[in-house]
């Protein structure tokens, strides 16, 4: 896949109380454990998680794909880490869409870390990093209409619900087949007179 992006976000993104960094090979076993411990929870909404078997090769293949996408500038996946212990709290990615100027964010949290503000903090930081890239005018977050926890994140961050659309059947076991599209546009910059 070719991308319209001319630059990449930083490999580490600052977030209050969190460390967001590009996944690395050294994360392989801890990532596999985090996904498997959380598979039932995140698999309700994310089809890739529902199908995981726990084979380490699945995570190795994922890390290979992540590295390739990063090098091609068509996807940027980060681990969300506890800065003190280094433990994996979850994952977040931002990817250019086929709509020039638009990037999409997706995220998941370890089941033991849900409801503590980590996904909101990570999404805030990644949104800011995406909107700082040249040519990015809009960031979107998509989630199933029934995924109320996920929908609360873009709402908290000032995203606007722009559409609820039908998709080809539920994309994951907990899905309804109706997807919410949340969007946040790049703030307008003031002109020389200070007007927006």
Image (cartoon, rainbow, N blue to C red):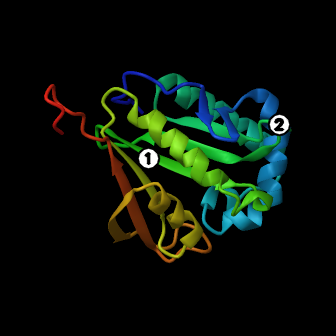
Res. 99 in view: yes
Q: Position of residue 159 (x, y in %)?
A: 39, 56
In the rendered image, residue 141, in percent from the top left (x then y), is placed at 45, 55
Q: Is residue 168 visible?
A: no
Q: Is residue 159 left or right of residue 148?
A: left
**The N terminus lies in quadrant:** top left
Using the image as rendered, state which of residue 59 and residue 134 is in the foreground. Answer: 134
Contact between labelled residues 1 and 2, with CB atoms less than 8 Å apart: no
Q: Tell me the quarter of the image containing the C terminus.
A: top left
Along the horizontal axis of the image, is 136 left or right of 170? left
Residue in view at x 83 percent, y 58 percent: 37
Name the residue that disc number 2 marks: 84
SS type, badge 2? loop
Residue at figure coordinates x 77%, y 52% from the top left: 35
Residue drawn where x is 37% and y is 27% of the image: 5
Query: For numbered disc 1, what is the local secondary structure?
Result: strand
| Left or right, 83 with reference to 132 | right
From the viewer's perspective, tell me whether residue 35 is left or right of residue 47: right
In the rendered image, residue 70, in percent from the top left (x then y), is placed at 54, 28
Task: Report which quarter residue 60 is drawn in.
Answer: top right
Q: Quadrant of residue 77?
A: top right
Name the residue: 16% across, 37% down. 195
User: Does 160 appear above or below 19?
Assistant: below
Name the one closer to the observer, 93 or 166: 93
**Residue ID for mark 1:** 104
């Amino acid at each position: 896949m070719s991308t319209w992006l001319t630059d990449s976000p930083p490999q580490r993104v600052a977030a209050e109380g969190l460390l967001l960094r590009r996944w690395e090979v050294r994360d392989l076993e801890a990532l596999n454990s985090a996904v498997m411990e959380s598979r039932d929870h995140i698999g309700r909404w994310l089809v890739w998680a529902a199908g995981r078997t726990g084979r380490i090769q699945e995570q190795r293949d994922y890390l290979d794909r992540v590295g390739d996408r990063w090098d091609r500038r068509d996807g940027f996946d980060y681990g969300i880490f506890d800065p003190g212990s280094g433990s994996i709290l979850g994952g977040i990615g931002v990817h250019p869409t086929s709509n020039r100027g638009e990037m999409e964010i997706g995220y998941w949290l370890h089941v033991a870390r849900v409801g503590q503000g980590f996904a909101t903090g990570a999404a805030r930081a990644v949104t800011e990093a995406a909107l700082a890239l040249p040519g990015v005018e809009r960031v979107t977050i998509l989630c199933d209409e029934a995924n109320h926890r996920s929908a609360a994140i873009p709402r908290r961050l000032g995203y606007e619900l722009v559409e609820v659309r039908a998709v080809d059947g539920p994309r994951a076991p907990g899905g309804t087949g109706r997807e919410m599209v949340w969007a946040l546009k790049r703030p307008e910059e003031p002109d020389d007179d200070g007007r927006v």
